[in-house]
Image (spheres, rainbow, N blue to C red):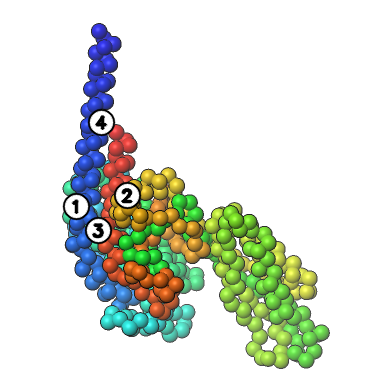
């Protein structure tokens, strides 16, 4: 009898738990439907924010106007707001009406030193100074859309706050495109200043607009999605001479040319490209002041991209070996400096698989696809070094447009179809609530 009673109690408990699980899923589905409705209602407001930010871009660590608008918005929503994080960053905390873990959503705020060529009523006319040079300033990578979408997600989630099963932290980050030389900034500084603590973040999500992906679509990749990015400098020192008497020199120009050619063999002959892409690009060559004078030294600089930390380290070693040995063979010397910028942006595979149904529900069947890795870089990777993270792309190209005709990111003609922003708002908000909901159900 006791055994039968125990079995009966276990059976009833199992039935009750299953019923509670189905109820929780139904409640979450209803919450997501409400979020989708609110995101659609917010479309005009999100587009207006985006246009304002686009017309008034600010360079990295100078986003005071943008940060002020963001902070005022978050305060109006009743969130806990902290300003001046990572210099000009803003953090808002929404504590849901139900207990649960903490999830972070991130947007970057900075523009680029480019003069816009688009004929838009809200095109940027802003001028500034960058590295001592007068420049135009433009949102040529879509950070204006990122800020607007995250502001929209904050407004949507604040309207369903009582049903949010946990805490959502909104991170508005400066200087994703990098700080001035010697100036700390971006995600690295925000992490250093504790943006993932108090309350401690359990997972982080971010989106990036994509000018070559049609609106209404989401793309992602588990594991290494975007490359690490490092800067290298090679100072080649030889012996100067009159250009008419080159035998009196140790020519750093010829030596530098040989080093540049040698560096091209790293990717073509040392990296197993069927497994991982990599890039070694020389971007600048500086040496000499007169056509008939062989200078005493030449300086090269460039970028290194890799999708695997082990490949990254191998490239570093190869650059040092090739530069120093070629220089030595010519009787010159080469001083190699490598400055790490950002690590590989790597989506946690388990988190990616867990959130894939959310992405499919947000965009609809056939509108979510896995992509190949890209050699662009993103400092979102600094958050992913500390907590599981998922970074994905939101389509921003007009329907039916040929991607080959869409202006690339970081160009003066870069532009976005704003009808894609609503999907970004909905995706951010539903990623937050679905992660919190599934985490709570796992614990029960």
Query: From the image, which quarter does the C terminus lie in?
Result: top left
CB atoms at circles 4 and 2 under 8 Å apart? no
- The residue tagged with tag 3: helix, strand or loop? helix
In the figure, 408 relative to 187: above or below?
below
Q: Which image quarter is the N terminus in?
A: top left
Is there any visible trace of residue 150 in the rendered image? Answer: no
Side of 243 where 285 appears, left or right: left
Q: Quadrant of residue 189?
A: bottom left
Circle 4 residue: 18
Whether tag 4 and tag 3 are in contact, CB under 8 A, the answer is no
Q: Which residue is mark 2?
A: 358
Q: Is residue 133 visible?
A: yes
Q: Nearer the viewer, mark 4 or mark 3?
A: 4
Q: Residue at x 32, y 35 (%)?
A: 443
Cα separation between marks 4 and 1: 24 Å
Residue 213, image x, y percentages: 39, 65
């Amino acid at each position: 009898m006791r055994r039968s009673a125990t079995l009966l109690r276990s059976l009833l408990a199992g039935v009750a738990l299953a019923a509670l699980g189905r109820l929780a899923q139904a409640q979450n589905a209803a919450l997501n439907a409400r979020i989708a409705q609110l995101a659609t209602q917010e479309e005009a407001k999100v587009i207006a924010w985006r246009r304002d930010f686009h017309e008034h871009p600010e360079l990295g660590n100078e986003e005071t106007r943008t940060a002020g608008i963001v902070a005022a918005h978050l305060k109006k929503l009743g969130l806990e707001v902290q300003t001046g994080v990572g210099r000009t960053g803003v953090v808002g905390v929404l504590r849901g009406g139900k207990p649960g873990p903490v999830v972070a959503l991130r947007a970057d705020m900075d523009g680029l030193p480019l003069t816009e060529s688009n004929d838009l009523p809200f095109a940027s006319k802003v001028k500034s100074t960058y590295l001592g040079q007068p420049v135009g300033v433009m949102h040529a990578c879509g950070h204006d859309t990122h800020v607007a979408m995250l502001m929209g997600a904050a407004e949507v989630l604040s309207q369903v706050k009582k049903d949010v099963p946990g805490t959502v932290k909104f991170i508005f980050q400066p200087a994703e495109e990098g700080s001035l030389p010697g100036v700390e900034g971006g995600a690295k500084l925000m992490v250093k200043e504790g943006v993932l603590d108090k309350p401690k973040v359990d997972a982080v999500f971010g989106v990036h607009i994509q000018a070559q992906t049609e609106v209404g679509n989401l793309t992602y990749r588990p594991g290494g999605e975007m490359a690490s990015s490092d800067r290298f400098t090679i100072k080649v020192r030889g012996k100067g001479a009159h250009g008419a008497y080159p035998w009196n020199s140790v020519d750093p120009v010829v030596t530098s040319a040989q080093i540049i050619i040698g560096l091209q063999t790293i990717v073509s002959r040392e990296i197993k490209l069927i497994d991982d892409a990599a890039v070694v690009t020389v971007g600048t060559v500086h040496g000499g002041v007169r056509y008939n004078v062989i200078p005493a030294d030449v300086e090269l600089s460039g970028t290194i991209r890799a999708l695997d930390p082990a490949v990254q380290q191998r490239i570093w070693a190869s650059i040092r070996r090739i530069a120093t040995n070629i220089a030595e063979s010519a009787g010159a010397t080469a001083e190699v400096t490598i400055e790490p910028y950002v690590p590989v942006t790597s989506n946690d595979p388990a988190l990616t698989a867990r959130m894939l149904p959310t992405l499919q529900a947000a965009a609809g069947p056939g509108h979510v696809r896995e992509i190949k890795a890209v050699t662009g870089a993103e400092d979102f990777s600094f958050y992913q070094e500390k907590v599981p993270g998922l970074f994905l792309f939101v389509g921003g190209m007009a329907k039916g447009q040929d991607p080959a005709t869409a202006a690339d990111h970081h160009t003066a003609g870069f532009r976005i179809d704003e009808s894609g922003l609503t999907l970004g708002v909905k995706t951010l908000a539903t990623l937050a609530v679905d992660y919190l909901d599934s985490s709570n159900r796992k614990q029960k």
